[in-house]
Amino acid sequence: MYDPLVPGKIYHIYSRTIGDELLFRNASNYAYFLRRYADFCAKHFASLCYCLLPNHFHFLVLVKESTNEAAALFAFSNFLNSYSKSYNKVFERHGGLFQKKFKRKQINTDSYLTEVIKYIHWNPQKHGIIQDFKNWNYSSYRTFFFKNESLVEIDWVLDWFGGIIEFEKNHLWEEDNQLEFLEFEDL
């Protein structure tokens, strides 16, 4: 089944590793993953936020109008293939690293967009990896405060929330938050 990435649309793209395999074994793996993402995907996507976790990742992207469906799809696929090949070589392993093809969900409503941004940033705390998601080093969350990274469209996201104060207020951890997005259940 062809699952396009349509120019001008926003997508939550995510995937996880096969079994108990780690996607990142050390800090340099996280940095390399983001470099490969930028190398393959920056031409096709405006990145709104991301979070990298030991066995899976999340990106929220706006497909650029200047690209086409096939180019966007191949760029993301080639990015994951490139990382997998490097990972296999460095760690002397063979075979697939990711489950099936990467998953994506088109964002169709304003409220869903806001919730997905929060969900992506909350992910390390949700999975019990860290007590406070704000301290996770492999997420775009802190980027919005320090404005020191060009990978993420900081101004676009801050404008969406109405500024940094509203961004921070919207990200307050909600212990009883039950995001009922079915596509997240397998992560």
Image (cartoon, helix red, strand yellow):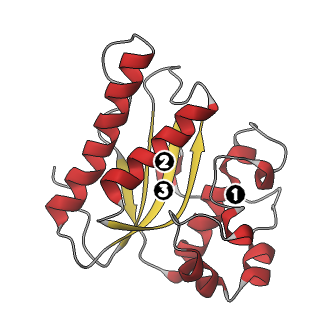
- Residue 187 in view, yes or no: no
Could you tell whether 45 is left or right of 58 in the image? left
The residue beneath circle 1 is: 178
Confirm or deny contact between disc 1 and disc 2 (CB under 8 A). Answer: no
Indicate the quadrant where residue 88 lies: top left
Q: CA distance from mark 3 to mark 2?
A: 11 Å
What kind of residue is marked 1?
A: Gln
Q: Describe the element under mark 1 as helix, strand or loop.
A: loop
Image mark for residue 59: 3
Which circle's residue, 1 or 3, is located before the other in the chain? 3
Q: Residues within 10 Å of mark 2 (few under 14, many from 20)?
A: some
Which circle's residue, 3 or 2, is located before the other in the chain? 2
What kind of residue is marked 2?
A: Leu
What kind of residue is marked 3?
A: Phe
The residue beneath circle 2 is: 34
Q: Nearer the viewer, mark 1 or mark 2?
A: 2
Q: CA distance from mark 1 to mark 2?
A: 29 Å
Foreground of the two, 48 or 87:
87
- Residue 59 in view, yes or no: yes
x and y, in percent, of residue 45 in the image: 35, 66
Q: Nearer the viewer, mark 1 or mark 3?
A: 3
Image mark for residue 127: none
